[in-house]
Image: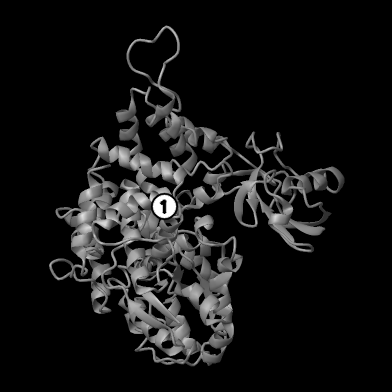
């Protein structure tokens, strides 16, 4: 089949370095990947096209790029899965990182963030003579995260990083989980304390982009959620995020459905007057438009709330 | 067409206009709704952070209630849809479902695994059908330029949302915008996060998201934006005046709920659609196409 590759080009050394799109018509076989077609362009059409790749087998994590708007490994993405005969495939460099040339991004900010989470084991006590021995079943939960190949695809499409480059991001937080949940690590509490800070676990929006695009099934967002739970269990509860999680759960338990106004107040904190006042214009606007939900005790519980409460009673304790 | 109507917390709380417009539009389209008044919150992914089994049990309870009615569930919230779809996927595992049913049994309930959960957006195209919709549309908003905004959980995770069998769901919002005679303003932000989940946690980032997406659509010439998610609406509409301070030119982009847009195209009264409750008034945008409110 024949497709058009619409490639975002950028060369900082060109006379006119402004990014632009260039189209290449390419013949592809059913078994070929987007990377194959890009390499064909580089070999036979335009040898100035910059593409980074190595293994071509979804192991090395070098060829992360955006295909039709979503980050992926170009070697793992078959052309037939993203275009039909005569169609166009748009290829762009990964997002949330500087572009060096064409489809090649600078991974330094990525590695800086990974280093930020102390990505090595910090066991406590005297060093054993041999290995640190743990039962295999106590490591099973880490199998998924250890499949991470550090390709940067999740970081590319992270919606929180898009507006705040200080956010540690999904890949580094997944790596943080890998050590914070390792039974041999002795610095878990210190790790969780650091992750609880600004830019850490509570800045994830739960948008699931990282889960959707990860080529290895790591599901970084799920691991960020696990870190949140660990942080709260370790006593780090004095954050907006932790209060929100607690207040949300309490609200559903009390009324069966959310008491939105009270949820916001409890998350912000009853005595956090400056922050509460900063929300006042929004609340007043909502009130003027007859859409400010009435908080408890005017918030009526659902019929059957006792069922919900009994379910909470049975399952809450088993965490 | 009859559904067990699951409005969700926000349509019964902070966005009453969504509830009003849904009821009105469904009545006009011949969609019969039996409201699930005793259904609980889905957990919105927040409850699941701490305790997934608890979240799945609450959703299984809702599914069991719908099974008792013998009706599929209709949602009007991207978040509810996504969270329910994920729970439903996990509950397909028979051993897990049996475990959850043990808890439900004490409440005299059982989830057999059959309940279908469908957002109004999908119902419009898959159950009501394009021809019936076309029949009801009087083209009163023809020429209006509308940007779609999905809400994360209507698009992700794709394996829970039936995209394998129905890939067209990924363009459902654009399809409905075109069907009602409006012009689609496509923009990359349509599939991104609105910022609502971190509103009280990191307000600065949340407002940056509002400004980014609404500003981007506005710059591309959108007269309005439409969303099938009340949580997105709360942020993109309710917090737009605050977020607008980030842009020298402001924003002023009305955000319509899906049934509000549909109702307008069906020539329904703006009062019945609750348009006066929207924080960013759609008045000016609607005047452009000769609709008065």
Q: Dot 1 corresponds to which residue?
A: A206
Image quarter for residue B17?
Answer: bottom left
Name the foreground residue: B148 vs A281. Answer: B148
Q: Residue furthest left?
A: A297
Q: Is residue A308 left or right of residue A64?
A: left
Q: Residue at x 78, y 59 (%)?
A: A4
Q: Residue at x 42, y 66 (%)?
A: B115
Q: Position of residue B32 (x, y in %)?
A: 39, 83
Q: Residue furthest top?
A: A129
| Quadrant holding the N terminus of chain A | bottom right
Name the foreground residue: B47 vs B145. Answer: B47
- Count the numbered circles shown: 1
Image quarter for residue A69?
Answer: bottom right
| Quadrant holding the C terminus of chain A | top left
Q: Position of residue B206 (x, y in %)?
A: 38, 57
Q: Residues within 10 Å of mark 1 (few under 14, many from 20)?
A: many
Q: Residue at x 67, y 44 (%)?
A: A76
Residue B145 appearing in the image: yes
Disc 1 secondary structure class: loop
Tell me which chain the residue with mark 1 is part of: A
């Amino acid at each position: 089949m024949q497709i058009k590759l619409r490639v975002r080009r950028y060369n900082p050394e060109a006379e006119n370095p402004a990014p632009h799109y260039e189209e290449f018509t390419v013949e592809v076989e059913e078994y070929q990947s987007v990377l194959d077609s890009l390499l064909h362009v580089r070999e036979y059409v335009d040898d100035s096209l910059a593409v980074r790749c190595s293994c071509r087998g979804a192991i090395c994590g070098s060829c992360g790029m955006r295909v039709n708007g979503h980050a992926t490994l170009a070697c793992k993405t078959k052309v037939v899965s993203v275009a039909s005969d005569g169609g166009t495939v748009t290829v762009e460099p990964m997002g949330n990182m500087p572009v060096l040339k064409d489809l090649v991004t600078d991974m330094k900010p990525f590695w800086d963030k990974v280093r930020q989470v102390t990505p090595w084991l910090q066991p406590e006590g005297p060093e054993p003579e041999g290995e640190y021995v743990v039962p295999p079943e106590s490591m099973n939960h880490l199998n998924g995260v250890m499949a991470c190949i550090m390709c940067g695809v999740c970081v590319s499409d992270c919606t929180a990083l898009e507006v705040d480059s200080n956010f540690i991001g999904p890949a580094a937080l997944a790596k943080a989980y890998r050590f914070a949940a390792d039974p041999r690590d002795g610095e878990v509490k210190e790790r969780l304390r650091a992750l609880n800070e600004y830019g850490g676990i509570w800045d994830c929006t739960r948008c699931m982009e990282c889960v959707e695009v990860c080529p290895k099934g790591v599901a970084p967002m799920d691991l960020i959620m696990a870190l949140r739970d660990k942080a709260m269990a370790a006593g780090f509860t004095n954050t907006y995020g932790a209060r929100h999680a607690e207040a949300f759960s309490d609200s559903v338990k009390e009324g069966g459905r959310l008491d939105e106004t009270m949820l916001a107040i409890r998350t912000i904190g009853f005595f956090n007057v400056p922050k509460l006042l900063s929300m006042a214009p929004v609340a007043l606007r909502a009130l003027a438009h007859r859409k400010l939900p009435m908080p408890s005790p005017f918030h009526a519980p659902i019929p059957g709330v006792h069922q919900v409460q009994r379910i909470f009673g049975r399952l809450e304790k088993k965490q | 067409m009859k559904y067990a109507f699951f409005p969700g917390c926000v349509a019964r709380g902070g966005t009453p206009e969504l509830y009003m417009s849904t009821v009105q539009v469904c009545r006009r389209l011949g969609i019969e709704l039996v409201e699930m008044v005793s259904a609980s919150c889905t957990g919105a992914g927040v409850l699941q952070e701490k305790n997934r089994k608890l979240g799945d049990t609450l959703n299984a309870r809702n599914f069991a209630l719908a099974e008792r009615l013998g009706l599929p569930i209709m949602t009007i919230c991207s978040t509810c849809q996504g969270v329910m779809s994920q729970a439903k996927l996990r509950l397909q595992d028979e051993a897990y479902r049996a475990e959850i049913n043990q808890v439900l049994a004490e409440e005299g309930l059982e989830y057999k695994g059959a309940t279908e959960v469908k957002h109004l957006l999908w119902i419009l195209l898959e159950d009501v059908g394009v021809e019936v919709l076309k029949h009801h549309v009087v083209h009163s908003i023809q020429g209006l330029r509308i940007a779609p905004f999905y809400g994360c959980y209507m698009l992700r995770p794709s394996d829970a949302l039936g995209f394998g069998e129905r890939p067209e769901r990924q363009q459902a919002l654009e399809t409905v915008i075109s069907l009602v005679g409006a012009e689609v303003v496509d923009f990359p932000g349509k599939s991104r996060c609105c910022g609502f989940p971190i509103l009280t946690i990191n307000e600065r980032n949340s407002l940056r998201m509002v400004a980014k997406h609404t500003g981007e659509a506005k710059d591309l010439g959108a007269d309005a934006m439409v969303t099938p998610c009340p949580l997105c609406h709360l942020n993109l509409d309710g917090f737009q005046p605050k977020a607008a301070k980030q842009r020298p030119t402001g924003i002023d982009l009305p955000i319509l709920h899906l049934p509000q847009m549909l109702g307008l195209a069906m020539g329904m009264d703006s009062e019945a659609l609750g348009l006066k409750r929207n924080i960013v008034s759609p008045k000016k945008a609607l005047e452009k196409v000769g609709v008065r409110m």
